[in-house]
Amino acid sequence: MRALAHPLRMRILSLVTDRAMSAAEVARELGDSQPNISYHLRKLADADLVGIVEEVPIRGGIAKRYRHIPPAVAAPRDPGDDHLLASALAAGLGARTARRAPGTETATDAELWVDPQVWRDTVAHVREMSLRLQHAAQPPRTPGTVRVSTTISMFEMDRC
């Protein structure tokens, strides 16, 4: 979870979900330096969040292409991880919100009490929607696509 604490790593992970990209490709897309992106990709690889899926010859060298590797099983989490993840999500959302197209946003923020079945159904729908977006993701700047941002954090709260 600490590997995701840096907002740039969240953006990198988002880019390499459902497509392989090299550090140079990620750097061009994010407007950052290739050495900085390489550093963060190594940190994500050390945390087993990305893996090298291919090596491509380029100008006398080898470009490693990375892709997100979803964990097979959720690992036990450190209690401080929730705060780190929430902070990283908030920072990423703040940065992307500044680049939104006017009139296109949909936002919800709520603390509610609902029937348990309504909650389970809602969680299932959100998971389905997330997978639908991830499976539909195209390489950056593919003609005929729109660039979108999605940040979702839903959880059952304690009864206090």
Image: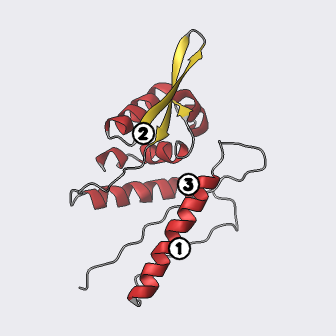
* Tag 2: amino acid: Val
Task: Inspect this view and state whether residue 110 appears.
Answer: no
Count residues near mark 3 (Cα–Cα under 10 Å), then give few for <14, some for 14-19, many for 20+: some
What is the residue that sits farthest to the right in this orientation? Answer: 144
Which residue is drawn at the image coordinates 43% and 59% (left, top)? Answer: 90
Q: Earlier in the sequence, mark 2 or mark 3?
A: 2
Q: Which residue is label 1 attached to?
A: 125
How packed mark 2 is, by other alpha carbons closer than 10 Å (few <14, some 14-19, many 20 or more), is many
Residue in the foreground of this view, choosing between 32 and 16: 16
Residue holding disc 3? 96
* Residue 94 versus residue 24 in the image, above or below: below
Outermost residue, left side: 79
Give x and y (percent) for residue 42: 38, 31
Mark 2 or mark 3, which is nearer to you?
A: 2
Does residue 96 appear anywhere in the picture? yes
Amino acid of disc 1? His
Q: Quick one: SS at disc 2?
A: strand
Q: CA distance from mark 1 to mark 2?
A: 26 Å
Q: Hey, what amino acid is under mark 3?
A: Arg
Query: Looking at the image, is mark 1 or mark 3 nearer the viewer?
Result: 1
Which residue is tagged 2?
A: 50
Name which residue lies at 55% across and 34% down: 21
Residue 71, placed above or below residue 120? above
Q: Earlier in the sequence, mark 1 or mark 3?
A: 3
Tell me the quarter of the picture where residue 78 sits.
Answer: bottom left
Asked if disc 1 and disc 3 are in contact, CB closer than 8 Å, the reply is no
Question: Residue 145 at x, y = what percent?
Answer: 73, 51
Query: Which quadrant, please, contains the C terminus?
Result: bottom left
Where's residue 49, x and y in %? 39, 43
Front residue (pair 149, 56): 56
Mark 1 in CB contact with mark 2 (< 8 angstroms): no
